[in-house]
Amino acid sequence: MPAGQRGRDQLQDHRKRLGQDHRAAARHATDRHRRDRAPDQRARLKSQTRLPLLLKGIMSAHDAERAVAVGADGVIVSNHGGRALDTLPATAEALPVVARQVAGRIPVLCDGGIRRGTDALKALALRALAVLVGRPQIHALAVGGAAGVAHMLTILRAELEVAMALTGRRDLAGIDETVLWPSP
């Protein structure tokens, strides 16, 4: 049996054991964790620090609007590496939705899937103000310590600069959706 079919069969078995559609289970889990106390917690955090409050894990227009409404200083589009719920969309799919909803009121950062300079270029083109780099940093640290991380960042920056040059962009402000291949 092919691996893909085996995975689909396992998912169907899991759904049967749940006795409900997996989307309903995901909605239940999300709703359970979205209590009305969250705005109070954010307000308390904001009152205890002068640092900006960035909300991570924003993946929908609804969550983006709520983040703006509660006074977040920025949002981080992240699916937490796909580990929280393996059926979440990629950050590149959610990023334009969140950025469109926020409409420049607060900064939008992208966390997830940034492995090369071209990935950073795409995220910036999808209207992220900045990208966060996690997994490559950990790998570089494991292999080369602090020098490995510095080298990885140098490579990432050089790749971004080459990608910008190849798309005719002189600076970060010039990156927009026109650097992306048009969708069919």
Image (cartoon, grey):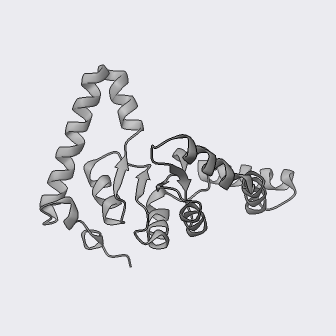
Rendered location of residue 171, percent (x, y): 16, 60
Residue drawn at x 17%, y 59% is: 164
Rendered location of residue 157, percent (x, y): 21, 45
**Viewer can see residue 1:** no
Residue drawn at x 73%, y 52% is: 37
Nearest the camera: 50 or 78?
50
Rendered location of residue 97, percent (x, y): 49, 70
Q: Is residue 104 above or below residue 2?
A: below
Nearest the camera: 101 or 53?
53
Which image quadrant: the C terminus?
bottom left
**Viewer can see residue 152:** yes
Residue drawn at x 34%, y 53% is: 130
Nearest the camera: 92 or 99?
99
Furthest residue toward bottom: 184
Q: How many marks?
A: 0
Relative placement, left or right, of 134 versus 170 is right
Nearest the camera: 134 or 102?
102
Residue drawn at x 22%, y 31% is: 151
Relative placement, left or right, of 8 versus 142 is right
